[in-house]
Amino acid sequence: MRAEFDETLITGNEMIDSQHKELIGKINGLLDSCEDGNDKLAAVKTLDYLAEYTDFHFTAEEKLQEEMEYPGIKEHKEEHAKLRKVVDELHQMLVEEEGPTPAFVEQVNRNVIDWLYRHIKGFDRSVAEYRFMRGNSENL
């Protein structure tokens, strides 16, 4: 399964949406590296790159939430910590295996792609709605 950015993932924040597109591209790059001959080194490097970009993205999201005094920031950060843990576990799995196994790819699909879709459609959409409501409260 490949990740796809579609209209159901749009939050309305250009920066966040563009970072989500980039993040999905990195996930697909990881899956591509898994398909290309089970090259362990390529998969590890791609996973490392995904982890770095994930940290960059989460930092940007959390900064935005702090600036707007988003009341759900604590829970949002906890969700981010869950994905960071998953990425660490995937890294460990790659190191311990001969390369990116079908079980590894299944974990990427279940624990990264599915998590990302749920996170964007739930947590990130809530932040976007809060930002919109706060910015338009004088119109209510």
Image: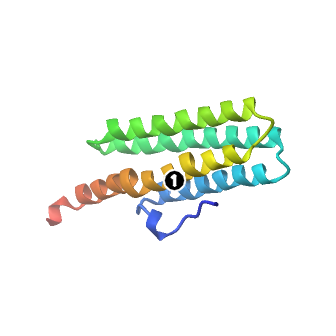
Question: Is 92 or 25 nearer to us in this picture?
Answer: 92
Question: Is 47 or 93 nearer to us in this picture?
Answer: 93
Q: Residue at x 80, y 43 (%)?
A: 42
Image quarter (top left, top right, bottom left or bottom right) of the N terminus = bottom right
Mark 1 neighbour density, 10 Å: few (under 14) some (14–19) many (20 or more): few
8 in relation to 85, above or below: below
Q: Residue at x 22, y 62 (%)?
A: 136
The image quarter containing residue 2 is bottom right
Query: Does residue 92 appear left or right of residue 43 in this picture?
Result: left
Measuring from the top left, give residue 122's x and y in whole percent. Answer: 37, 54
Q: Residue at x 44, y 45 (%)?
A: 61
Q: By what rule are the colours in the image chosen?
A: rainbow
Q: Residue at x 83, y 44 (%)?
A: 39
Query: Does residue 99 appear left or right of residue 131 in this picture?
Result: right
Residue type, label 1: Asp
Image quarter (top left, top right, bottom left or bottom right) of the C terminus = bottom left
The residue pinned by badge 1 equals 114
Query: Does residue 61 appear left or right of residue 95 in this picture?
Result: left
